[in-house]
Image (cartoon, rainbow, N blue to C red):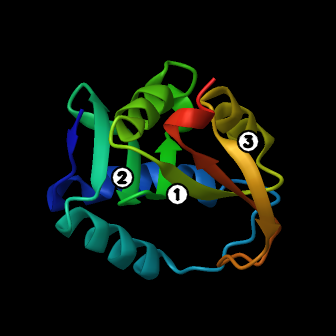
Amino acid sequence: MEHAALWHLPGLLRILWALTRNTAWLPVRRSRWTDLRLLARFIRAKQVRMLCENARPVAFLARHGAQVHALYVHPAHQGRGYGQLLIEEAQASGALELWTHAENLPARRFYGLAGFQEVETGHANDEGVADVRLVWRKETER
């Protein structure tokens, strides 16, 4: 596991777009240029941790303090424990919170198994779809 550098950006965008551009229920609201700028900002701030396989990024987590902004595992690499490794490393630093889309049942199940509690619903995201806020604290860990 390592911090992402700007030269990893193409590989990280490949992961992001493999999921956000190919999910039937998720409307595309942000341009690719906006995705690039946002992810580059997180990388420059040393807020992106990633896992590589054969020197290529396969999963990443972006967070600022307790707020997890993104956790993506490329579809070809899901089910290998990469997401769990990234979330466990983040949990070692203390409390975490995040939002996920309400329709993203696999993500909700994943976070539930990782000890997150669903605490709020909303729809104030870029896509305008229903979402769920989840929190994790050491005392809520199962």
Q: Residue furthest top?
A: 80
- Residues at badges 1 and 2 in contact (C-beta under 8 Å)? no
Q: Residue at x 30, y 41 (%)?
A: 50
Q: Residue at x 16, y 55 (%)?
A: 5
- Sequence-wise, the earlier of marks 3 and 2 is 2
Q: Measuring from the top left, give residue 62's x and y in whole percent.
A: 38, 56
The residue that disc 3 covers is: 108
Q: Is residue 66 above or below residue 106?
A: below
- Sequence-wise, the earlier of marks 1 and 3 is 1
Q: Residue at x 32, y 50 (%)?
A: 11
The residue that disc 2 covers is: 12
Q: Is residue 61 above or below residue 30?
A: above
Callout 1, which amino acid? Trp
The residue that disc 1 covers is: 17
Q: Measuring from the top left, give residue 90's x and y in whole percent.
A: 38, 41
Q: Is residue 9 left or right of residue 36?
A: left
- Residues at badges 3 and 2 in contact (C-beta under 8 Å)? no
Q: Residue at x 78, y 75 (%)?
A: 123
Residue 49 lies in what quarter of the image?
Answer: top left
Label 3, secondary structure: give it. helix
Callout 3, which amino acid? Arg
Label 1, secondary structure: give it. helix
- Residues at badges 1 and 3 in contact (C-beta under 8 Å)? no
One can see residue 98 in this view: yes
Residue 44 lies in what quarter of the image?
Answer: bottom left
Which callout, 1 or 3, points to the residue nearer the camera?
Answer: 3
Q: What crowding class fits label 1: few (fewer than 14 Cα within 10 Å), some (14-19), or many (20 or more)?
A: some
Callout 2, which amino acid? Leu
- Sequence-wise, the earlier of marks 1 and 2 is 2
Q: Measuring from the top left, give residue 120's x and y in whole percent.
A: 78, 62
Name the mark on residue 134.
Answer: none
